[in-house]
Amino acid sequence: MTAIPQERRVVTAIPGPKSIELQARRTATVAGGVGSVLPVFTARAGGGIIEDVDGNRLIDFGSGIAVTSVGASAEAVVRRASAQLQDFTHTCFMVTPYEGYVEVCEALAELTPGDHAKKSALFNSGAEAVENAVKIARAHTKRQAVVVFDHGYHGRTNLTMALTAKNMPYKHGFGPFAPEVYRVPVAYGYRWPTGPENCGPEAAAQAIDQITKQIGPENVAAIIIEPVLGEGGFIEPAKGFLPAIVKFANDNGIVFVADEIQSGFCRTGQWFACEDEGVVPDLITTAKGIAGGLPLAAVTGRAEIMDAPHAGGLGGTYGGNPVACAGALGSIETMKEQDLNGRAKRIEEVMKGRLTAMQEKYDVIGDIRGRGAMIAIELVKDPATKEPDAAAAGALAKACHAEGLLVLTCGTYGNVLRFLPPLVIGEDLLNEGLDILEQAFARL
Ligand SMILES: *Cc1c(COP(=O)(O)O)cnc(C)c1O
């Protein structure tokens, strides 16, 4: 493995000629429904840099959507996964088990909130983990209804499309969706009519009232929420909202599921974002950052809930693949050894400082929010009306891409620029990325 120089370098237009050639082949053969943010073809990646086939080096503020928190070629991930590849690639844990799977479950029991007895089951993708959390909650409660929230995102399979809030691009034309899914308000402070101070308790009261009146708590198997909403726009539920929902779930025998697929594994400066409000979920779903880029997901939770499904009721051919488990153990090793929670907090400090200075100059920045290395700015046409400005988000992203800074957009209104750098990014690269963003604002 050769270390990639941690320096931005733009030597062609972006995308360059080799990427354009590959993109033509891709368009001819890859289904049009699969999009790409930036059609720059990757040659190698690591630390805070993505190097493309034309020799450009982009600063990475995306981490492959919050996946490569330890970098895309972390030493411990490569070492452990390579060793596992030499030994065996697969047996299927449901046929003959192996130690790596058990070790990952032990690590999840140790790292997730709460000191109760915990068990885990491993899967391949975030959506699969969320689906299985629903199966487990239904088996445990013998109830059917599932409650989710405005602006929530939980995946693209049939059940998780039903759980996801946003129509375009996730659901449009793909129905009918799974039944017994109910959506209630979330505490979106920036857009709450009576202001962010009142938002937490008011939104919780509205959500609880709707569940009580429209579903009946005795029919609810699970309440599923992202402790920081990801695709919906990096919305941090206003203070007090999460604890109120957790208390309601506990009082009514409802399984509270924290979907930490995007916010987990040091991304917000904690192992899991719900720790910031002392929330202990019954079940927690993880994926993305767990395995340094290898496909792995998990449901972890109270042993008595996790054990509710009958033997053979959970599983999948590849779930907890040994190479992915080795990657997860390498990723967790890196997070501990390099104190990536500390790094995430430092990234927040640098980013929020710089973004606050930009907000003073550019009032298109309506809101700055997020925690750790999960930071976003919401763009508006006018700070008084808060009318969403998706065009500005698109234009800024495009301007950043042209200069070799990879940024992503998100949000129900498409007007949020989100920053998800690898937690191992150097501070010089981080600041250089923010310089590029600042220049993009100046030219907007
Ligand atoms: C990405 C994501 C998912 C879906 O994960 P996949 O691995 O893409 O299936 C589910 N929930 C949240 C919060 C996510 O960010």
Image (cartoon, grey):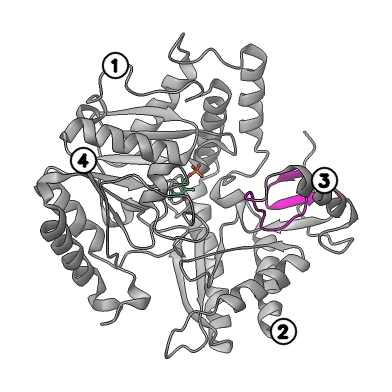
Region in magenta: 33-53
Q: In screen coordinates, is 372 left or right of 244?
A: right
Marks 1 and 3, how far apart at CA: 46 Å
**Amino acid carrying mark 3 in the image:** Arg
**Amino acid carrying mark 2 in the image:** Arg
N-terminal label among 3 and 2: 3
Q: In screen coordinates, is 72 left or right of 125?
A: right
Q: Are marks 3 and 2 in contact (CB under 8 Å)?
A: no
**Amino acid carrying mark 1 in the image:** Ala
Marks 1 and 4, how far apart at CA: 20 Å
Who is closer to the viewer here, 253 or 340? 253
Q: Position of residue 313 (x, y in %)?
A: 32, 21
Q: Residues within 10 Å of mark 2 (few under 14, many from 20)?
A: few
Q: Which residue is mark 3?
A: 25
Q: Quadrant of residue 417?
A: bottom right
Q: Which residue is mark 1?
A: 311
N-terminal label among 1 and 3: 3
Q: Secondary structure at mark 4?
A: loop
N-terminal label among 1 and 2: 1
Q: In screen coordinates, is 197 left or right of 40?
A: left
Marks 1 and 2, how far apart at CA: 60 Å
Q: Does the segment drawn in magenta span residue 41?
A: yes
Q: Position of residue 296 (x, y in %)?
A: 50, 33
Marks 4 and 2, how far apart at CA: 52 Å
**Which residue shows up at 54% across the image and 21% down it?**
322
| Residue 144 marker | 4
N-terminal label among 1 and 4: 4
Q: Secondary structure at mark 2?
A: helix
Question: Is residue 271 shown to the viewer in this render?
Answer: no
Q: Which residue is mark 2?
A: 443
Question: In the image, which is nearer the foreground, mark 1 or mark 3?
Answer: 3
